[in-house]
């Protein structure tokens, strides 16, 4: 009997010792192929291999990831660097620990019949822009072009754009914000041909900023156990991203299986995944310092109204990816 009790105790201790570490990931938006790498890592057991129990929490129009993180509702979140740097300057100590997206997918999509051929033609136009932190790249771009965002003949009228393409289709705006992997396809799905449109990729305009990075709170990085957990999380997540790049249709199907809303379609998610793969290509998860510095320079070049007022310090670390990529 004594032997049996000891064995049971030993088993309990072993189970406790090997219990998977919990990680709560807050996405920037709803379940879609933009986040395929994390869903793939969970589905394929890459998190299990790192002894992690990861909960992937969908975002949406009523969810502010930074607030969720600050309130302790998540361990890690996804955000665009401009938004994260702005939040950091305002007092929320966000730190980028990995950068799965190498290239920006942000662009403006305009009606060709407006006669717009370049940024110089934006004056006097109405342009749809997403807010909640997504407006910063556009505001920086207009500032560099010397174009006011207060309306009038010499400025642009900024239309606060919802998360659809109606303002363009209904001619409420001459141009709208679109992502290569999402809204641009929605415009085409509405029956508009590419010949009717002119697009301006932020990447081509030299004002691209880093998107969809992985962020944590600075104080948490002081905890060795948390850092170790993030090393394993980043390693497994990047394994998921590379698998998704190489198997885009399977990755899209995995996303669809996780879409509790039922709003996504196979055709849309497969197209999105193929476009997303172009943005993650070339990244091993480590933040490229030159890309980071370009983002900071873009945000600082805001004239009298810059997104950030000084060069950030401690806004990113290579410690996690250096360990994860060994």
Image (cartoon, rainbow, N blue to C red):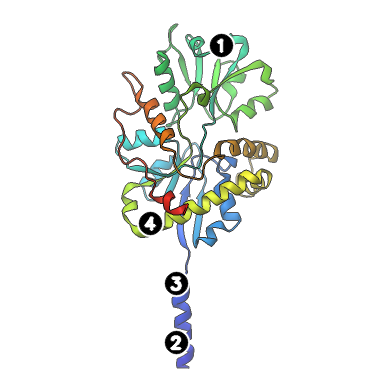
Nearer the observer, 318 or 105? 318
Check disc 3 and report its element: helix, strand or loop.
helix
Could you give the CA–CA distance between mark 1 and mark 2, rounded to whole angstroms? 78 Å
Query: Does label 1 or label 4 sit earlier along the sequence?
Result: 1
Residue, disc 4: 226
Marks 1 and 3, the one that precedes in the sequence = 3
State which tag comes first along the sequence, 2 or 3: 2
Q: Is residue 222 above or below residue 152?
A: below
Disc 2 from disc 3: Cα separation? 15 Å
Location of mark 1 (residue): 116
Distance (Cα) linking label 4 and label 2: 32 Å
Find residue 136 and report its horizontal and vertical position in percent. Answer: 42, 27
Tell me which label, 1 or 2, sits earlier in the chain. Answer: 2
| Mark 3, other Cα within 10 Å: few <14 / some 14–19 / many ≥20 | few
Circles 1 and 4: CB atoms closer than 8 Å: no
What whole-number distance in Å separates the C-alpha atoms at marks 1 and 3?
A: 63 Å
Q: Residue at x 61, y 49 (%)?
A: 243
Give the secondary structure at mark 2: helix
Residue under circle 2? 6
Query: Sequence order check: which comes first, mark 3 or mark 4?
Result: 3
* Inter-mark Cα distance, 3 to 4: 18 Å
Q: Which mark is residue 16?
A: 3
Tell me if residue 52 can be seen: yes
Q: Nearer the viewer, mark 4 or mark 2?
A: 4
| Left or right for 295, reference 34 | left
Who's the residue at 43% across and 21% down the image? 141
Q: Is residue 235 left or right of residue 168?
A: left
Q: Disc 1 on helix, strand or loop?
A: loop
Left or right: residue 97 compared with residue 174: left
Q: Position of residue 10 (x, y in %)?
A: 45, 81
């Amino acid at each position: 009997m004594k032997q049996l009790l000891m064995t049971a105790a030993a088993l309990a201790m072993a189970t406790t010792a090997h219990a998977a570490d919990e990680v709560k990931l807050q996405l920037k938006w709803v379940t879609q192929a933009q986040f395929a790498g994390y869903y793939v890592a969970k589905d394929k057991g890459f998190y299990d291999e790192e002894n992690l129990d990861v909960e992937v929490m969908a975002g949406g129009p009523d969810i502010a990831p930074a607030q969720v993180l600050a309130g302790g509702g998540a361990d890690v979140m996804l955000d665009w660097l401009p938004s994260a740097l702005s939040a950091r300057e305002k007092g929320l100590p966000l730190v980028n620990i990995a950068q799965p997206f190498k290239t920006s997918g942000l662009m403006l999509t305009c009606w060709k019949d407006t006669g717009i051929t370049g940024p110089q033609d934006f004056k006097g136009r109405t342009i749809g822009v997403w807010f909640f932190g997504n407006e910063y790249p556009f505001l920086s771009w207009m500032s560099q072009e010397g174009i006011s965002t207060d309306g009038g003949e010499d400025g642009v009228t900024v239309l606060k754009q919802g998360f659809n393409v109606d303002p363009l289709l209904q001619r409420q705006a001459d141009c709208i914000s679109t992502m290569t992997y999402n809204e641009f396809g929605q415009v085409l799905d509405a029956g508009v041909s590419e010949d009717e449109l002119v697009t301006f990729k932020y990447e081509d305009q030299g004002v691209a900023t880093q998107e969809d990075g992985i962020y944590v709170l600075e104080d948490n990085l002081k905890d060795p156990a948390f850092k170790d957990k993030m090393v394993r999380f980043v390693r497994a997540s990047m394994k998921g991203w590379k698998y998704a790049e190489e198997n885009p249709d399977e990755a899209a199907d995995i996303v669809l299986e996780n879409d509790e809303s039922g709003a996504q379609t196979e055709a849309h998610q497969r197209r999105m995944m193929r476009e997303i793969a172009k943005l993650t290509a070339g990244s091993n998860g480590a933040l490229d310092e030159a890309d980071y510095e370009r983002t900071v320079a873009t945000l600082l070049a805001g004239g009298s109204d810059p997104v950030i007022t000084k060069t950030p310090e401690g806004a990113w670390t290579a410690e996690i990816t250096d360990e994860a990529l060994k």
